[in-house]
Amino acid sequence: MENHIEDSTRFSFDALTKRLSAILRRHGCSQTVADILANNCVSAERDGAESHGLFRMAGYVSTLKSGWVDGKAVPQVEDAAPGLVRVDAQNGFTQPALMAGRPLLVEKATRNGIAAIAIRNSHHFAALSLDVEPFAQEGFVALSVINSMASVVPHGGRRAVFGTNPIAFAAPRANGLPLVFDQATSVMAHGDVKIAAREKKPLPAGVGVNSRGEPTTDAAEIIAGGALLPFGGHKGSALSLMVEILCAALVGGKFSHEVDWSSHPGAQTPHTGQTIIVIDPRAGAQAIAPLAMRVEELIAEMRDAGTDRLPGERRQAARAQSDRDGIAVSTAMQDSLRALEME
Amino acid sequence: MENHIEDSTRFSFDALTKRLSAILRRHGCSQTVADILANNCVSAERDGAESHGLFRMAGYVSTLKSGWVDGKAVPQVEDAAPGLVRVDAQNGFTQPALMAGRPLLVEKATRNGIAAIAIRNSHHFAALSLDVEPFAQEGFVALSVINSMASVVPHGGRRAVFGTNPIAFAAPRANGLPLVFDQATSVMAHGDVKIAAREKKPLPAGVGVNSRGEPTTDAAEIIAGGALLPFGGHKGSALSLMVEILCAALVGGKFSHEVDWSSHPGAQTPHTGQTIIVIDPRAGAQAIAPLAMRVEELIAEMRDAGTDRLPGERRQAARAQSDRDGIAVSTAMQDSLRALEME
């Protein structure tokens, strides 16, 4: 199912997923890992999250070829406590580790009202929203944080220590897709800076500094030895610090500043950790109104106050269009995929 | 123990606590509630959190006199699920509800690795840092959020819907007091705006809008029908939305915009809810380094990168001075306390 529009072609979700999975297998992933990553990558593209979609494939291939990550890793799930699942991803990607621990996590959250999964020794190179949204589709509230590699200067500091350290949250809605947000604790996500550098577009002021610690609006300067700034000054910086603690100290993963891929040229994936907290709002809630209904009431109030766009709405609109018309892939991206298929 | 310094007098923690407790009892609190609130209020003053310290006493008395809150409420603790404590504060203050549910919460967090407390039908008028720090002193990681009353405009909106909705986080350190932050998701906390209004100090640009939705730097205008703005634009706004969901929809409390004290002139305390998530980093952690040690390593790296002040350090310095010299109370505040003792 292809559908030509200007300089792009629209593909079905399944066709793209199969194609990406084959590329990932070709470059060292097991079938299980390839299928999970391909599905994740196409889901991001479908949702219009360009920086975490097909654009990531070259990075996946590069990092696999560098030997920095094990594409065939089999995650080791530990039943750490009645409310806690720990997973050693065995130097593999995070998404297969999450998939491996997920059934136990959901079982614990359902039984206890709250549970968490703490993944270590893992590589996350994807959109965090995709990790939390499925929990909300099953009626849970989910909060996830993930660190990456030193690229953000702590408030008041002179060089990068934190990762872009996103926070993602998902809650069920009674009358629609879950409410989901996924936002870097830096002013801008690293993926978006990369895209700006590729397109040679200047950034707004306040996004980052160059290698001498001076403010710059040149994305290429930020990538070449510069650093990003936390959003909201000391407040975003404190949240980023929290993410480091929850993703590294709690799970037994590396802090962003400890990630050292210098002996693996071509490596691109942060080797850190991830935590997801899952809450079942139905637990012991006989006396209160269902959360999904209450979320609708809050959204109605926000609309009435003039809020024109909720977090995640742009993503949902892109998804609806992709579901209807197929996923648009530019000619340039098709060339890039073909190159990865030949490499 | 008094110790005169300029136009203030220094009092011991215990002397001040007894005095505040007596005032709260005089105005309708039970002994239990009065003791808990007095301890909380003096702790904030000791920590230099002026906006949540003795300054709050007039508000406590006013809200008690209005009949809006029940100073004698006995919280009802519900063992909602193996990992979840729910508490109906019975229209009383949040702190006694937390104290009532705390032993069960700690037991659950210890057993399960993670647990939460969801408090509803409660009034919170204090520093959120004081709710989370004790958990970190016992080796847990704690995250708390609380909503308040409509005073913050959602990003893109025209009128206030959210509360100032602070997020507080605490983690143990191996070599010192816990790392604690407590920050409003608004650019500025409401208490600080009140203090600026009292002192007739102009605010920085971008803090709030007046009653016509126009930007203003006049704190009095913000209080008189204006509103605050979220920090970091759409990102702070999304976090504030998350706080509303976790504090109202999850716990069965009111959203900030639903708080209506119009029939209780003098009411000052938001009647909402609170959630605290407590994680035991020791759960199933045989294979990884202790969290409190790892936090030290992260802090060392931040210092090395030039970070001159960590979150909570100003508070800790104020506490150390208060512990050494007593808590300084201005002459004006002493007059205010005397008036509350006479009312």
Image: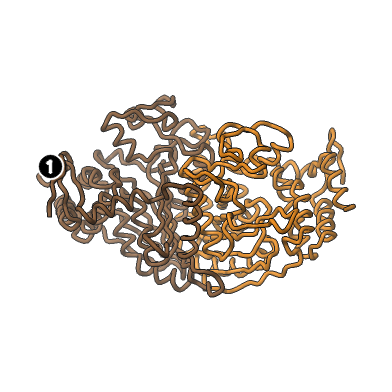
Chain colours: A brown, B orange
For this rendering, which residue is in front, A188 or B67? B67
Image quadrant in which the C terminus of chain A is located: top left
Residue topped by disc 1: A339
Which SS class for mark 1?
A: helix
B180 relative position to B37: left or right: left
Q: Can you give x and y, in whole percent of width and height, for residue A101 in the image? A: 35, 65
In this picture, is A298 found above or below B175? below
Q: Can you give x and y, in whole percent of width and height, for residue B152 in the image? A: 57, 46
A282 relative position to A199: left or right: right
In this picture, is A297 found above or below A282? above
Q: State whether residue B286 appears in this view.
A: no
Amino acid residing under circle 1: Ala
Q: Can you give x and y, in whole percent of width and height, for residue B343 in the image? A: 88, 53
Q: Can you give x and y, in whole percent of width and height, for residue B158 in the image? A: 52, 44
Residue under mark 1: which chain is it in?
Answer: A
Which residue lies at the image location 65% right of the left edge and 59% below the top edge?
B271
Label 1 Cα crowd, 10 Å radius (few <14 / some 14-19 / many 20+): few
Query: Residue B76 occupies which quadrant of the picture?
Result: bottom right
Which residue lies at the image location 57% right of the left edge and 32% below the top edge?
B205
Most extreme residue toward the left, as rendered?
A: A342
Which residue lies at the image location 39% right of the left edge and 52% below the top edge?
A273
Query: Residue A220 occupies which quadrant of the picture?
Result: top left
